[in-house]
Image (cartoon, rainbow, N blue to C red):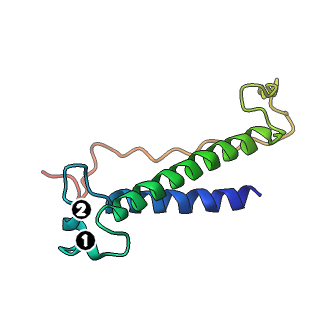
């Protein structure tokens, strides 16, 4: 059900954007958008403007209702996790001491260079 409402919501949003972009402003001539013979068009001289504005209003209502429907559906879902802040804190303290049975390897250090030696890397 949620997927169906979401598909209708996206289609209504895309159609709404397209219809708003097709419409001209109040001051624009209707004939400029549909050619010079707008009075002979399918909807008549002012019929196309009324058709587009009515369709836009219907799509706006559909978009609004699907938004409310999706909000209602998402609020009714039950979740097991209530978030990070409400979970109990787990004790992750370090152990009291390192077990003595484990052999410890001596740390190997780099051999110290003799400052008095003459090597090819040292400039003279």
Image-quadrant location for residue 21? bottom left
Name the residue: 73% across, 43% down.
74
Q: What residue is disc 2 on? A: 30
Determine whether the residue tagged by mark 1 lies in a helix, strand or loop.
Answer: helix
Name the residue: 72% across, 40% down.
72
**Cα distance in 3D space between marks 2 and 1:** 7 Å
Picture coordinates of residue 33, whole percent (x, y): 23, 67
Is residue 114 or residue 66 the one in the foreground? 66
- Residue 30 left/right relative to 71: left
- Residue 46 left/right relative to 81: left
Tell me if residue 21 comes above or below residue 116 in the rendering.
below
Tag shown at residue 63: none
Is residue 96 or residue 59 the one in the foreground? 59
Image-quadrant location for residue 78? top right
Tell me if residue 96 comes above or below residue 55 in the rendering.
above
Picture coordinates of residue 119, whole percent (x, y): 25, 56
Q: Earlier in the sequence, mark 2 or mark 1?
A: 2
Tag shown at residue 38: 1
Image-quadrant location for residue 34? bottom left
């Amino acid at each position: 059900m949620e997927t169906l409402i979401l598909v209708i919501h996206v289609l209504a949003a895309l159609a709404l954007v397209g219809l708003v972009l097709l419409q001209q402003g109040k001051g624009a001539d209707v004939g400029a958008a549909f050619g010079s013979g707008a009075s002979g068009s399918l909807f008549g001289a002012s019929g196309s403007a009324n058709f587009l504005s009515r369709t836009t209003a219907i799509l706006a209502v559909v978009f609004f209702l699907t938004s409310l429907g999706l909000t209602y559906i998402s609020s009714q879902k039950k979740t097991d996790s209530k978030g990070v802040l409400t979970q109990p804190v787990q004790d992750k303290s370090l152990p009291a001491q390192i077990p003595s049975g484990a052999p410890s390897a001596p740390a190997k250090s780099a051999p110290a260079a003799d400052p008095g030696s003459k090597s090819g890397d040292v400039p003279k």
